[in-house]
Image (spheres, grey):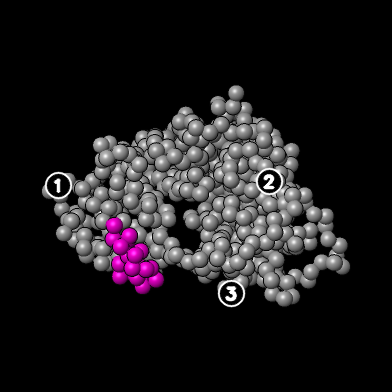
Amino acid sequence: MPSTPFDPQRCTLTVPNDLCYLGLIQHFVRDYVSQVGFSTADLDRFDLAVEEAVTNVIHGAFAADEQAEFDVSCERVPAGVQITVHDEGLPYDPSLTPDYDPDAGLDDQTCAGLGSFLIRQMADTVDFLNLGSRGKETVFVKYLEHGSVADAGPPAEPAPLEAPPPVPEPERVDLHLGHMRPEQAIDVCRCIYDAYRYTYVNEHMYYPDRVVALNRSGDMVSAVATTPDGEVAGHAALVFPEDTHDIADLATVAVKARYRGQSVARRLGEYLDQEARERGLAGIYVDQVTAHTFTQKFCHRLGFTDCGFLLAYSPATTSYKGINEKLDGRGSLVLGYKYLCPPAETPLYAPLCHRPMIAEIYERLGVPCSFAHPTLDAELPAAAAVAVGAAAATAPPDAAVSTDGAPADAAAAAAVGAAVEPAASELIASVNTRRSAAVVQVPVYGPDLELQVRRGLHRLKCEQVQVVVVYLNLLKPGTGAVADLLEDLGFLFTGILPGGPSGDRLVMQYFNGLVVNYEAMQVEDETARRLLEYIRANDPQDV
């Protein structure tokens, strides 16, 4: 099994692939989760989920007479626990498992797909990770059952539909800005509810214990604006992506209705900007809604530059109290980014057809941009992702070209032919059920990538995921060819998202039965409108 860094919160049990060890595995998981604080009823549910996941591995990953082993890991996550079942057995395509229909009649009912159905019913999140040569994992997370903000008392009155005028300086409340204290978490949840009711897509923000746990773990840094009598008037946070702490999302911005018009959100944004600089972050990004231009204007004043879109990414139920109550279909987001540390100019591996637009985005961001030689990025790695990486490492310095794609020394192309042992592709998909959206990372490009993407798409379609977002590392050789492949499979280029040392990202999206309503989108910035027009012109579903 692959080695992992030591983690005092993670316990791993390695067992032979024999069902006689199922009881041992269940006791291992029960002992761990009981110390976390789960109830007896929850322990029984863990038993069932573990039984299904382990049985799937033993029966599906190994031959009947094969002697092997696999891992079961328990790990604390904010306000809950994560169970991971990892094996290096036969590749498995979960999309081939029929969906279990609990409403089917007795004559039509079968047990096919029952195990996966039971795991999804028990867990809060379930992910299947294809790790290529490192095997595969089934990962499910269960959160502790604590009260949400609904138990905290009656909600505030709805905010008026019209935006309030600015409050004159002498009439403004004297607010103190600082990091959230644990006892303030309940007021933060009330603040979220006041602004969004129950439509906010990050459901953690309705549970005070989860807000506290996320801050303690460092996955989120909450800032609050507090009145002299201790009331939380507003909240904003830096939320870190799962794969990097080089950048952070300025998110969960909410201001109670009676404190609007007092620049609370702007002051919280500036406070967290300084926090990000002190932490040495490369930059911060923000999601801006297109149901109105208010948040876009707000983010532009904070120094963010539009660089991409997440089309149809928000569920149709999302509303923004006091701004716009009537949304038509799923909502789209504008991606904004702000550099905090000047980046070094590094050749980007980008699809040839989109390089002029990508160069325009970087120019708007105010950073230099160059592209790797097209030959280094013209096709998928025939041997492995590392083959192209080796070629890039041995290519002459002039292999980088300007934004017009002018060819450089042909010796760079010859280096691509280096023979390297093939490596299987890796796909990591995370599904947000509240958004009905999946985010996919591709750490390794291998010769089987097209097959893995097709299988992954089929599985997500079976799970009725409506939107798939793929982030490709622009610093990774082969990304241009991978982007071309994804476009052939129906993906749409929608922009970029800088990522600091961890790599800038090319953003691509796939829509499962959705047609993007471009006409309903309101975009404030002329550059962003030009990018949206470019995206729309390349969208084959827009007629």
Q: Is residue 223 left or right of residue 80?
A: right
Label 1: how many residues lie within 10 Å, few (<14), some (14-19) or many (20+)?
few
- Kindly report the distance in space between the C-alpha atoms of the residues bearing marks 1 and 3: 55 Å
Q: Nearer the viewer, residue 376 or 304?
A: 304
What is the number of the mark on residue 64? 1
Does residue 42 belong to the magenta stretch?
yes
Residue 255: image x %, image y %?
69, 60
Residue 340: image x %, image y %?
66, 57
- The residue under label 2 is 325
- Kindly report the distance in space between the C-alpha atoms of the residues bearing marks 2 and 1: 58 Å
Residue at 35% across / 41% down in the picture?
Answer: 103
- In the displayed orientation, state which residue is furthest to the bottom: 229
Image quadrant containing the C terminus: top right
- In the displayed orientation, state which residue is furthest to the left: 65
The magenta-colored residue range is: 30-48
**Looking at the image, is mark 3 or mark 2 earlier in the sequence?**
3
Q: Secondary structure at mark 2?
A: loop
- The residue under label 3 is 183
Kindly indicate the quadrant of the structure image that contains residue 398: top right
